Amino acid sequence: MRNILVPDNMKTVANACFTGKNPGADLGIIAELFKTSRDQIYLPIQKHTDKVVVIEASLEPVIADAVITKQKGLLIGVQVADCVPVLLCDLKKQVVGAVHAGWRGTAEAILKKTILTFYDKFFSDPADIQVAIGPSIRQCCYEVDGEVIRAVSLATGNSDYFKSKGDKFCLDLAAANQVQALTAGVPEGNIWISDDCTFCSPEKFFSYRFAKGSTGRQAGFIGIL
């Protein structure tokens, strides 16, 4: 059975979805689902960076962890297995984006930088941007050390996205990215967050931590087709 999750705030503004284990990041199935071709699906080479790439003509894969495009007919996406997938859409400017935000990307404020790029390149008003935060490892299952919390806090500010657990901390990366979106000017009502925890639901999602190493990938895809 295919596990496809369409964010509530994207249903009428863009072609968007998050996947689970089935179909994962199978581009053949995704192309069929969106009635497009595999060569019209763009995935960056993800390296836990803060690089945001704007796709205009060339579809040559580059190292980046956030992708933005205004190109109609192109489906963009990111792959994850605990990290946070984020989809963005400004319907007024006809611009979409996809972000891979692990703790390193979150500590580098990659989502805020993506929203800023929407403004810099396409004059998007953050108030017009819809943000969907997909399934990821949540606070219940994501134990990290103080170094990670300090790095994320420097980029995000203090909030209730982490709590102490002895000499460790439990971090909610999805909530941290919500805070970054709010700080960047996106209204709270424009932000949708999946309740799913990838670690808690290994039957539905790939989880790097649950698998204790090598595992598959699910994804988030968005486009104006």
Image: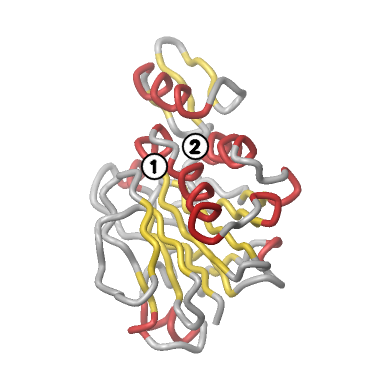
Marker disc for residue 102: 1
Residue at the far top: name it.
Answer: 167
Q: Residue at x 41, y 60 (%)?
A: 67
Count of numbered badges drawn on the protein: 2
Quadrant in the picture for residue 123 = bottom right
Please tell me whether residue 190 is drawn above or below residue 212 in the rendered image.
below
Q: Quadrant of residue 46?
A: bottom left
* Element at label 1: loop
**Do the residues bearing badges 1 and 2 touch, measured as CB atoms within 8 Å?**
yes
Across and down, in percent, residue 25 comes to 37, 69
Give the amino acid at mark 2.
Leu
Of the pair 136 and 182, the residue shown nearer to us: 182
Q: Say which residue label 2 marks.
A: 173
Q: Residues within 10 Å of mark 1 (few under 14, many from 20)?
A: many
Q: CA distance from mark 1 to mark 2?
A: 8 Å
State the residue in front, 195 or 16.
16
For the question of whether residue 218 can be seen, the reply is: no
* Percent x, y of residue 152: 44, 27
Vertical order, 105 against 80 (above or below): above
Residue 173 location (% of width, % of height): 49, 37
Vertical relation: 118 (above or below) 101: below
* Residue ID at (36%, 77%): 27
Image x and y of residue 11, in percent? 69, 70
